[in-house]
Image (tube, helix red, strand yellow):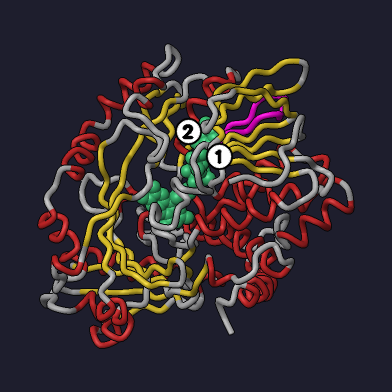
Amino acid sequence: MQSQTHIENPDVVLIGSGIMSATLGAVLKNLDPNLRLQLYEVAESLAPEASNGWHNAGTGHAGLCELSYTPNYGPDGEVDVRKAIQIFQQFEHSLQFWGYAVRSGMIGNPKDFINPVPHLSFVYGQKQVDFLRSRHRQLSRHHFFSEMEYTEDRNRIREWAPLILEGRNNEPVAMTKMPHGSDVNFGALAAKLVEWLGKQEGCGFATLHRVTDLTKSNGRWKVQVRKLNTGDTFTNPAKFVFIGAGGGSLPLLQKSGIAESKGFGGFPIGGQWLISENPELIEQHNAKVYGMSPGAAPTMAVPHLDTRIIDGKKALLFGPYAAWTTKFLHEKGSMFDLPGSIRLDNIASLIKVGLHNIPLVRYLIQQGTQSMETRMGELRNFYPAAKTSDWKLIDAGIRVQAIKKEDGDAGIVHFGTEVITDADRSLSALLGASPGASVSTNIILEIVQKCFADRLQTEEGHQRMKSMIPTYDEDLIKPEMAERQAAVAREAMQALQLVE
Ligand SMILES: Cc1cc2nc3c(=O)[nH]c(=O)nc-3n(C[C@H](O)[C@H](O)[C@H](O)COP(=O)(O)OP(=O)(O)OC[C@H]3O[C@@H](n4cnc5c(N)ncnc54)[C@H](O)[C@@H]3O)c2cc1C
């Protein structure tokens, strides 16, 4: 797959066709229509790795239901909800940009990639109920979450998500509901943005093209590319390179040799889902229901039972089940990815990760090798009446979490996203995957503000960015911004057909 033109000596090379490169390409071309961009994707199709519809949960993460964003109590004895508020604001940037993409004709039908699905949190046992009550009390005070409902009433929970109570014992339960949640097919969205980009003057994309090396000379990055169908190799020099290669980012960052890449390592975590295509079950569940992380599970392994809408078809998804892997990518990855990423500057961090995270490694190995009945046991904590015959196991994406030296204490696995930019702002790379695709616009905004600041400083550039992301330079968290936030959100949600 490729666009009609291949751009030689472009201003920008984008590596990878996932949601991050696709968003950066689309934002930059709208910001400065004269920019010349070329995108390379190693796989045969667009966005087949972490962004692919079935490789992630498709939750539009806005802090509405994810209890792992608010794990701690503050000094006042109430749940600390600051991170959920921050993620809500970041997700607003995505909603605004996607709304713009539809209104401006970059994307035709929003239903092809985003659909309204309420976001619920569910807990059981008195300790968890107390936690959720406090979380709701704190969140519902903020204008972002004023619509959040809380209940301990089983009849109400049954109205919101009947499967969760089917066959459940009499322990205390509680649930919160935010009506305006979303299910997003990030792979479909990325592919649409890349296809749009490929039709613009001075832009091109090509699949089955692997970027193999990056070297800087005479102020330009020499991007070495191998065409996988012929084996030919060529070099395309660019002013700016974005390494948005997902699991493939770390090896390329290391090859760039930039000082900022030193010390980074990667810790891959594979994943699996149970999915059900039984129409009777699908009919009874219309929500994304998030619970609490069990025991040693990493924060991203919180169980959730989700309505998914992919290619216009509904399904149910439960998981994730983590798994031990040494591959960084599904399609074009190899078992040698992890050992091949070991360098003198990161070996100490990697060894420390192994030693400091023995429970995590043990958890990953145990999760990856468990039987279908053990997996069903986890689902039954959530949906007690689940029948094995309704569910099948599929692979999810691989997250390569960043490991870095921090304050002299090496060996911390970071469950966030790291943007690494070189000193002369000619290269940016993205490591990590949480909260991920949902906040892709916010991450890309950070890169644009850092590396393309000159474009934003002109009146025209500022106006162009305001059309794409109207509140990019405003703080919606402040109480006095409640009306502005509601108005901008309504406009975006109407364009995306998330509300009437
Ligand atoms: C199990 C799981 C569940 C998740 N759930 C959610 C969720 O519910 N909501 C959410 O917002 N986020 C979620 N995420 C995170 C989200 O999927 C990622 O943050 C996001 O998809 C990353 O996008 P990306 O563009 O960086 O990477 P990718 O989509 O992986 O794209 C990178 C692309 O680069 C290509 N590539 C790699 N190396 C090269 C090379 N050398 N040359 C050319 N191309 C190359 C790859 O083939 C790939 O297509 C989840 C992730 C996982 C793994």
Which element carries disc 1, helix, strand or loop? loop
Comparing 102 with 462, the one in front is 102
Q: Residue 248 — which label?
A: 2
Q: Residue furthest front?
A: 230
**Cβ of mark 2 under 8 A from ligand 1:** yes
Quadrant for the C terminus in the image:
bottom right
Determine contact: label 2, label 1, CB under 8 Å.
no
**Rendering quarter of residue 423:** top right
Q: Is residue 176 left or right of residue 180?
A: left
Circle 2 residues within 10 Å: few <14, some 14–19, many ≥20: many
| Image position of 38 with respect to 350: above or below | below
Comparing 315 with 146, the one in front is 315
Point out residue 23 in the picture as x, y percentages from the top left corner.
63, 50
Tell me the distance, in whole angstroms, between the alpha carbons under discs 2 and 1. 11 Å
| Residue 316 shows up from this direction | yes
Which element carries disc 2, helix, strand or loop? helix
Q: Is residue 418 left or right of residue 272?
A: right
Task: Identify residue type, mark 1.
Answer: Glu
Would you name the residue on which mark 1 appears? 41
Q: Which residues are magenta?
A: 420-430
| Residue 418 shows up from this direction | no
Q: Residue furthest right?
A: 459
Point out residue 409 in the picture as x, y percentages from the top left corner.
40, 23
